[in-house]
Amino acid sequence: MKTKPIVPRISTRLASNAGIDTTVSGRQKLQFERLNDISFEGLSFESDVAYRKGAILTITIPVTQPAFRVISEVVWCKPNGGNYKIGTKFLQIQNGYRMKMLEQLTFIETYRKKVFFDENRSLSCEQAYSELKNYFQYQRH
């Protein structure tokens, strides 16, 4: 039996629960899906749909400003407690755009953790973004 060579990951994955919108062949999905994690090369998310390996998805993360939109290819799909865990790799995306999105999500996730440890409040990614947005708008006045 041939074993696959171990290929080290190029970049670290950032855990995030940000909501995402997925589109397959131009058809918007109706259900709301959530990220598991994201890196410079791709992302994984939970879905109630089993995507086939090689499927091309347009994934939008609306919590970043502007909304992060990327074309991704499904590289794996695994059953996960009645749903599926999907792994994708990004296709043709500018590095600067990718870095800006990752910086924003890192800032939001850091804030979520701080609020949890300092105030014992659990926030979704969207709630954390809303609080941060309100805070910075208040600071400008």
Image (tube, rainbow, N blue to C red):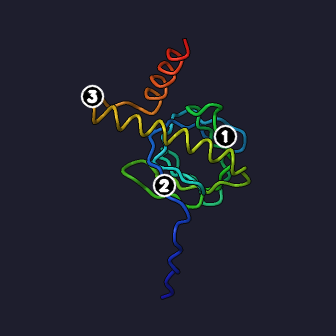
Answer with the quarter of the image where residue 26 lies. Answer: top right
Question: Which of marks 2 and 3 precedes in the sequence?
Answer: 2
Q: Secondary structure at mark 1?
A: strand
The kind of secondary structure element at disc 2 is loop
- Residue in the picture at 48% in, 40% down: 34
The amino acid at mark 1 is: Arg
- Mark 3, other Cα within 10 Å: few <14 / some 14–19 / many ≥20: few
Extreme residue in the bottom direction: 1
Q: Identify residue for label 2.
A: 13
Disc 2: CA contacts within 10 A as few (<14), some (14-19) or many (>=20): some
Outermost residue to the left:
120
Given contact means CB atoms under 8 Å apart, are the residues at marks 3 and 2 in contact? no
Closest to the camera, between mark 1 and mark 2, is 2
Residue position marked by numbered label 3 in the rendering: 119
Q: CA distance from mark 3 to mark 2?
A: 26 Å
Task: Report, in whole angstroms, how far the alpha carbon at label 1 lies from the one at label 2.
Answer: 18 Å
Frontmost residue, 2 versus 6 = 6
- Checking the image for residue 69, the label placed there is 1
- The quarter in which the C terminus is drawn is top right
Residue 75 drawn above or below residue 111: below
Amino acid residing under circle 2: Arg
Q: Residue at x 60, y 60 (%)?
A: 53
Q: CA distance from mark 3 to mark 1?
A: 33 Å
Amino acid identity at mark 3: Glu
